[in-house]
Image (cartoon, rainbow, N blue to C red):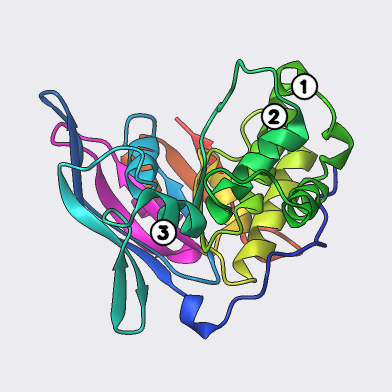
Amino acid sequence: MSLSATTRPDSRDARTRSDLVAERVRWAAGARLILDGVDVTAPVGAVTGLLGPNGSGKSTLLRIVAGVQRPDGGKVALVDHDAADDLLAMPRRRRARTLAFVEQDASTDLPVTVLDAVLLGRTPHRGVLAGPSNDDRRIARGALERTDALDLADRDVGTLSGGERQRVHLARALAQQPRVLLLDEPTNHLDIAAQLATMRLVRSLAGESVTVLAALHDLSLAAATCDHVVLLAPGPDGGRVAAAGPVDEVLVPEVVDPVYGVRTTVLRHPRSGRPVLTFDE
């Protein structure tokens, strides 16, 4: 699988180059504290990996940033120079033009074609009662081409494999032409080649001034493809940030081992020079 680098989103000027900043985010499920004062910065022009063991609050944090669920405390903003745009206070329609969220294992029981599913990403950009325009269809097909899924356009979404659905959901997000892209396990259900192709596409989006925050469970994939990582650690008092910064500074044994309960060895890839992580109990 080779995801296309063509059909890029519309160009963005300097005014839309914004870092995503979450400050002191707190959320509890009943008496159980899931996130406790979490700070995250996802710089524009970089791929930021959100890492951590199961139960550390990665998916919860993404859902809060996306506005799907409300935090018990904290704020989320797009910061551009000295200005901050509060994402949580932003009207839903405007937020949908600003931010796209690809959830893990998103599914639908509706009998809808792949092209129509991707066209849903254009909804925030047109009138409330307006149908898809020719331009909407052009953008949707371009998004499918970019995720190597154009050949699926006429298929029913319900007939797709897990990996095919993942590519279609990513295409729907691209059709939104967002400034911020949130991804929850974007390589879930994908084989190795498709994982690498997806992350190449994500990196190309970051190069187009899209702010990318992706939850990943594979530390080696994060080391190979991310520029910046945030490592969450679960605990009795809720998930907290154990470390954040460049990959070479965070994905090291003294940081990773106490969070995951493993012994980490860091090697270097012979071609890229990026870290390669191996683990022992």
Element assignment for label 1: loop
Q: Is residue 251 magenta?
A: yes
Q: Earlier in the sequence, mark 3 or mark 2?
A: 2
Which mark lies nearer to you, 3 or 1? 1
Q: Amino acid at mark 2?
A: Arg
Element assignment for label 3: helix
Q: Which residue is mark 3?
A: 250
Residues under numbered marks 2 and 1 in contact, where contact means CB atoms less than 8 Å apart: no
Q: Is residue 279 magenta?
A: no
Q: In front here: 150 or 234?
A: 150
At x 75% / y 32%, what residue is drawn? 114
Q: Left of 275 or right of it: where is 155?
A: right
At x 69% / y 17%, what residue is drawn? 111
Query: Residue 51, which numbered label?
Result: none
At x 15% / y 42%, what residue is drawn? 72
Q: Amino acid at mark 1?
A: Asp
Residue 117, percent from left and from top = 67, 34
Residue 154, percent from left and from top = 85, 30
Tell me the CA gap for discs 3 and 1.
42 Å
